Image (cartoon, rainbow, N blue to C red):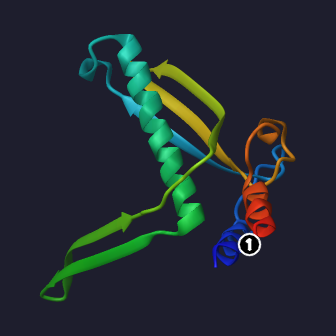
Amino acid sequence: MKVKCLLLLLAGFIGLAQAEDLPGVVTAQGFGTVDPAMAKTNAQARMLAKRAAQLDAQRQLSEQVKGIELRAGSTVEEYEVKSDIIATRVKTWLQGTVVVDEKVYEQEGTWIAEVVLGICLTNEADICKERESLEAISNAANSQY
């Protein structure tokens, strides 16, 4: 059963977006900002923006891997829409993500961070040579049975 689950998981990654220069890596870009007035120091503001960008990238990867749960509702009064509420939720477990690229800079007094995270499907890309890929995990599980 474990082998089938891993194979299905690996097969599910085939249709995901892969960076052209990183074969075998699924990537997602996240953004984060922090108002310097909310942080005690510039260093803290930079780190908070970077952390927000990492969380956004993890959410983006999770949506690619698992999909999202979408709930929506509308309030209508006298045949006129008064409000729309749309909520999304992602629940997944990510392991083995790698930072592909990151930038932190100040623009108009606000710290902005951009982080690109990836998950190695194979060991083809240089950043994945020393990492355990989903392909390796699947092969190890198959050899046990």
Q: Amino acid at mark 1?
A: Ala
Residue sitting at the far left: 78
Q: Which residue is mark 1?
A: 11
Indicate the quadrant containing the N terminus: top left, top right, bottom left or bottom right. Answer: bottom right
Q: Is residue 116 left or right of residue 13?
A: left
Whether residue 96 appears in this view of the structure is: yes
Dot 1 alpha-carbon crowd within 10 angstroms: few under 14, some 14 to 19, many 20 or more: few
- Residue 140 quadrant: bottom right
Q: Residue at x 77, y 49 (%)?
A: 19
Q: Which of the pair 59/32 is nearer the observer?
A: 59
Q: Position of residue 53 (x, y in %)?
A: 48, 37
Badge 1 element = helix
Left or right position of 49 against 119:
left
Q: Furthest residue to the bottom?
A: 79
Image vertical order of residue 35 relative to residue 76, above or below: above
| Image location of residue 105, percent across then percent down | 52, 20
Depth check: give the residue in front, 115 or 130: 130
Is residue 108 in view from this perspective? Answer: no
Side of 109 where 30 appears, left or right? right
